[in-house]
Amino acid sequence: MNDKNQISNISEILRENGISPSLQRIQVYKYLLENHTHPNVDTIYKDLVHIIPTLSKTTVYNTLKLFQSKGLVSVLTIDENEARFDINTHIHGHFKCINCNKIFDFDVESIKIDPKIEKENKIIDEQFYIKGFCKECLENEEI
Ligand SMILES: [Zn+2]
Ligand SMILES: [Zn+2]
């Protein structure tokens, strides 16, 4: 997909979700589509400020909060100190390397939740986390 097509597709997705597609919003969404690294606000800001010099961290943060409220991104709280954002809102697990801070996805067949809990309560967020040392760190013997 060329850039122009992609941008008009993103505009369409944002509009369908009741978000007016400003340049900043489009670029943040595009960044998340292209970077499945579960970035935090700082990383997104640092990578995009070259493209959008008027961008601020607050704008990035507010944009992500807006996307979250519309169900377009999910927020990972795997890290105690920072929120990391994920454009993949389908249920999947996350592995976090406690050495290099990388977070990657893995498929989960299904998480069996006690039906009583589901029936009596309203679940709004499900997270499945594993922490450890990633393959690369183990191979590089950095640990
Ligand atoms: Zn690692
Ligand atoms: Zn993910």
Image: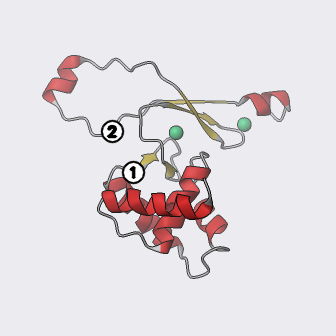
SS at circle 1? loop
Ligand 1 located in image quadrant: top right
How many residues crowd around disc 2 within 10 Å: few (fewer than 14), some, or many (20 or more)? Answer: few
The mark that comes first in sequence, 2 or 1, is 1
Asked whether 123 or 21 is in front, the reply is 21
On the picture, is 72 further left or further right than 95?
A: left
Asked whether 69 or 78 is in front, the reply is 69
Quadrant of residue 91 within the rendered picture: top left
Name the mark on residue 125: 2
Residue beneath the point at 30% across and 20% down:
113
User: As displayed, is residue 137 above or below residue 43?
Assistant: above
The verdict on label 1 being within 8 Å of ligand 2 is: no
Locate the C terminus by quadrant.
Answer: top right
Name the mark on residue 83: none
Label 2 to label 1, Cα distance in Å?
Answer: 13 Å
Judging by the rendered image, the residue that carries numbered circle 1 is 72
Percent position (x, y) of residue 54?
56, 82
| Residue 133 is at least partly visible in this image | yes
Percent position (x, y) of residue 88?
47, 42
The kind of residue on which mark 2 rests is: Asp
Quadrant of residue 67 within the rendered picture: bottom left
